Amino acid sequence: MSSRIGRLRRAAILAVVGLGLGAGLSSAEEPPVQKQYIPLLTYRVGAYASSGIPIWAGIIDYFTYLNEAEGGINGVKLFWDECETEWGVEKGVECYERVKGGKDGSPVPILWPHSDPIGKALTEKAAADKIPLVTLNYGRTEAVDGRVFPYSFPVVLSFYSEASTAINFIAQKVGGKDKLKGLKIATVYHDSPYGKETQPALDLLAKTYGFENIQIPVAHPGNDQSAQWGRIRQLKPDWVFLRGWGVMTPVAVKTAAKTGFPVDHIIGGIWSSSEEDVRPAGAVGKGYLAITTYPAGADFPIHDKIRRFVIDTGKSNLQDKKSFGSVYYNSGIVDAIILTEAIRTAQGKFGHRAINGEEARWGLEHLDITDQRIDEIGATGLQPTLELSLSDHEGGGIARVIQWDGAKWSTVSDWIQADRDLLRPLILERAAAYAREKGITPRSDADSTN
């Protein structure tokens, strides 16, 4: 009897060991995911499609280049799909819910809302799901304070910095910041939360430098601006800061010309700085100025690489080859560089595999795109350096000014630095108010290693 029990015990032990070995073998046979899913929230239809289509082309062409020429990011290839939002909040949130779980075994590392209202609507959802929202040159200004907004990244140029660089450019043109005193500067803005975003910054800048701050709203979509530019004719401002979007910008330029306001004293904001914004204005657009962080042009080394591996091989996403090197196409390239470099940074800590949102947040908060790295990519002059941290989710605060010569954009300034130290207390105040409202305990610098 005892020998039989012994045999049964030995058999049971061997069975358990066998199961363990089998499980280990099964696990060893399952390689880590070697592809990274990037969902794209796009708007190829609707009022802003003409702006969006070249952006997606720049993003997708850069992804394709990385896959074709470099085998992805450290051997991890990228794959993507699109979800149509029409730039609207309801569809944007639906798309987010559809894609947030990842695809084919790959989690979502980072999500681009590509819409200011969608980005604001997703702030709390994305934080709860631990998926970083990257909003290049738009998004919640207070999210610059990453202690309160760990999963929102308004990278490179917040709306406050956009306003400040416009004012600093005017200061350069008139001979210094002391010469701003007594000037009249009018902001013609899209009458929406996006358009109103720069008002607190401009109030502070006007108080600091002594210029008169005039605010003139334009109702969406901005097809008729005769009343607004009639008011400008009466007020006679020295400069106009145009914060438009879509059809509002060319209508503003044409209406300004009709009322006799000099177009070369209009400075468009970051979303009024594309070819799509000035071509419809025709000849009267010549001389128009705008702020950008991604100048136009296809003569950067990265364009040669994309041309060789993507354009010439018939793998481009471009619908109109004339958009190759346009402002919005280049913005897509810069978007893609920032996202992929954040993933690359995260891989340095977590391994060469698909990265999840929490790991990508760490990668973003430790992102340091230096001049040397920009040169290696082939984007020198196309994008500024970018260093992010837990307490600074913007990182740049610099922009350049471009001018339309009737056929193309020319860069007419060096990188202009925003008055970030002056604006920082405003940002912290807004972030603290949000934290109180939502019951958020801000993170400390000690959390940056986590």
Image (cartoon, rainbow, N blue to C red):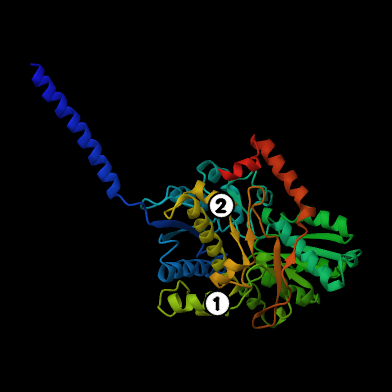
Who is closer to the viewer here, 409 or 79?
Answer: 79
The location of residue 86, given as percent across then percent down, is 52, 59
Who is closer to the viewer here, 26 or 235?
Answer: 26
Who is closer to the viewer here, 171 or 318?
Answer: 171
Q: Residue at x 85, y 68 (%)?
A: 237
Residue type indicated by callout 2: Leu
| Residue where numbered disc 2 is placed | 133
The location of residue 55, given as percent across then percent down, is 54, 67
Residue furthest right as drawn: 182
Q: Is residue 202 visible?
A: yes
Q: Is residue 331 visible?
A: no
Residues at marks 1 and 2, CA–CA distance in whole angstroms: 29 Å
Within 10 Å of the Cα at label 2, are there few (<14), some (14-19), or many (20+) other Cα atoms?
many
* Residue 227 placement, left or right of 66: right
Who is closer to the viewer here, 71 or 273?
Answer: 71
Residue furthest top as drawn: 1
Which one is earlier in the sequence, the residue at label 1 or at label 2?
A: 2
Q: Secondary structure at mark 1?
A: helix
Image disc number at residue 301: 1
Q: In the rendered view of the protein, which quadrant contains the C terminus?
A: top right
